[in-house]
Image (spheres, rainbow, N blue to C red):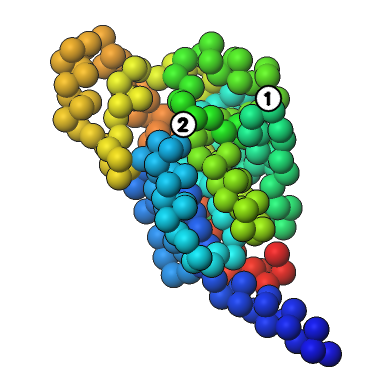
Amino acid sequence: MRVFNRRREAARASAAAPILVVTGMKREAACVAGDGVVPLCSGANVARLRKALDELGGMEFSAVVSFGLAGGLDYSLRPGDVVIADTVVAGERRHPTHLRLSDVLTEAVVAGGCKPIPGAVVGVDQPAMDTGAKTVLREANRAVAVDMESHVALEFAQARKIPLGVMRAISDPAARALPPLAAKALTPSGDIDNATVARELFRAPGQIGGLILAGLDSRAAFGSLGRCGPLLGPLLRLVLADL
């Protein structure tokens, strides 16, 4: 009986702990802000994200969710499509996400009026800027999407022995390259660096067409995140004790 009670108390404590949501941009984090959710923004920098996770110290979390935009690798995916990863590819290894947590994320996507798409997501340390890089990633990893946070979120979840889920909306599709300035467009805090964008456009104005297309793609992706993200926290808190 004492063992059963200790397990029940541990489950309650886990359910009471917040959900850590790892993003690359502040705008992504704003889509999931709410009670019981702790967003952590990397500013699209893997080293900075690892440092921020280390600085969380002994803070307890019930689950980790990698959330935000992703680049498309599968040609069938369009801007705004939402991928619920069943696998995270990190280096040469493939790691399954938590099945029940992924089911909850899928429920959030459906409730938000979007179609959930299962598949593998590959995490990278540098952005996949062009179609050639995306082709290599797709063929080498059998993945449908790529981002810069999921593999780091995986490391954290494994170290803490807590569930991992991934919800990513496609921004730039497989057939679309990003303009070079996109690699410099974020501040360390995850905001758009408007001064840098303007400077890079002045230096290379030919990027304006790619920037406009990237903006339209991201608008579709943020539309999906804005519909699904607010549902994530409430749905997860309902089932955390069962994870």
Q: Measuring 70% from the left and 52% from the top, which residue is drawn there?
A: 98
Camera-nearest label, 1 or 2: 1
Is disc 1 placed on a helix, strand or loop? helix
Q: 147 or 177, which lies in front?
A: 147
Give residue 181's position: percent from left, percent from top: 30, 21
Residue type, numbered disc 1: Asn
Give residue 55's position: percent from left, percent from top: 42, 56
Q: Earlier in the sequence, mark 1 or mark 2?
A: 1
57 is higher (above) or lower (below) than 117: below
Does the residue at mark 1 contact the one at mark 2 (Cβ under 8 Å)? no
Give residue 173's position: percent from left, percent from top: 51, 24
Q: Residue furthest right?
A: 1
Q: Measuring 83% from the left and 90% from the top, which residue is drawn there?
A: 1
Q: Quadrant of the C terminus?
A: bottom right
Q: Measuring 49% from the left and 35% from the top, which residue is drawn there?
A: 148
232 is higher (above) or lower (below) than 82: below
Query: Picture quarter containing residue 136?
Result: top right
Crowding near pointer 2: few (<14 within 10 Å), some, many (20+)?
many
Direction from residue 135 to residue 54 in the image, left or right: left
Spatial distance from mark 1 to mark 2, Cα to Cα? 20 Å
Disc ID at residue 141: 1
Q: Does any portion of residue 102 appear in the rendered image? A: no
Q: Which residue is mark 2?
A: 171
Query: Picture quarter containing residue 35?
Result: bottom left
Is disc 2 placed on a helix, strand or loop? loop
Give residue 190's position: percent from left, percent from top: 32, 42
Q: 208 or 132, which lies in front?
A: 132
Query: Picture quarter containing residue 195?
Result: top left
Residue type, numbered disc 2: Ser
